[in-house]
Amino acid sequence: MLTLLFAVFVTLYALKQGGEPQVNKAAGSLQESFNTPLEDIPIDRRVGPSEQGFGVFEHLKGDQILAPLIQKYPAAEKETVQVIEAEMQRFRMKLEERMYGPDRVRPGEKGEKGFDRIVAVERTQKGFKLRLTARYFFEPGETHIKREALPELDKIIELLKEMDREITVGGHTDSLPPKGEMSNWELSTLRATSVLRYMIRQHDFPQTRLSAVGYADLRPIAHNGSEDGRALNRRIEFHVHLE
């Protein structure tokens, strides 16, 4: 841009030194160049008269708007955000009541209430997500759901089915490679599809409202340098789309 501006001003200065005839000649040349219709511009990309145009800038129009670097909710969509928040809160309350009863916490391994939570509900840009800690539902390196975890998973799936929304099941791993030849990509994807298959076969979940995706270890929510952090990163997420 700076180079082009410099060239323009140098040209203007040179024209000024040449007097009025040179200025008129250059202006006419520029006008002729920019007002010559370009044959390689498709008709549907042109603006103005269909037979002849007004130059290159009028002929070619953009049809795409670049997405903003930072995704934000527009002020006009404030009501949509409030609807998502309300829907998420209702879902959280129903979920905790069904899974944990009046106390709304999961008993820990040592018997004390609130020792460890399985479920977390968080708002997303177009809805909310339900996060499950994978260690409660899968053995290390396995893709089949634990039999003892099925009753809790059943309650979650039934509640999701009642919402009648599109659901994306996402699988996540920590940064450590699994044993054997399987990669974290395969492990995360197979776990997600295993849950999806269970939703369809055991709960008759509408297939048109389901999708599955594996993220491997590329979307951590905690540091992989500790066992506690890796345990949080190994998870299954249900993304509920409200838009």
Image (spheres, rainbow, N blue to C red):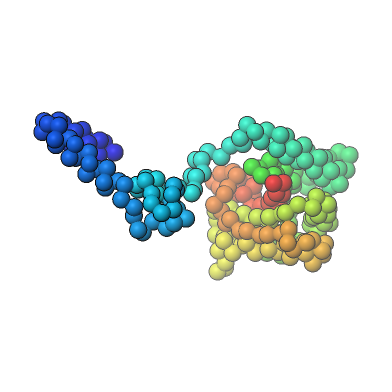
Residue 146 position, x and y percent, is: 76, 61
Closer to us: 116 or 165: 165
> Quarter-wise, where is residue 77 in the image?
top right
Q: Is residue 139 left or right of residue 147?
A: left
Q: Which residue lies most toward the front here?
A: 51
Q: Residue furthest right?
A: 102
Residue 234, position in %: x, y?
64, 52
182 sits to left or right of 139: left
* Residue 27 vertical position relative to residue 130 in the rendered view, above or below: above
Measured as percent of width and height from the top left, residue 71 is found at 56, 40
The residue lying at 57 percent from left, 61 percent from top is 185
Residue ranking furthest to the bottom: 181
In this rendering, position of residue 190 left or right of residue 45:
right
Residue 206 in view here = yes
- What is the x, y in percent for residue 27? 22, 38
Front residue of 145 and 230: 145
Residue at 35% x, 58% y: name it: 39
Give the camera-side residue of 27 and 121.
27
Residue at the far left: name it. 18
**Rendered residue at 76%/52% (across/down):** 165
Residue 100 in sight in this render? no
Work out which quarter of the rendered image holds the N terminus and state it: top left
Within the image, what quadrant is residue 96 found in? top right
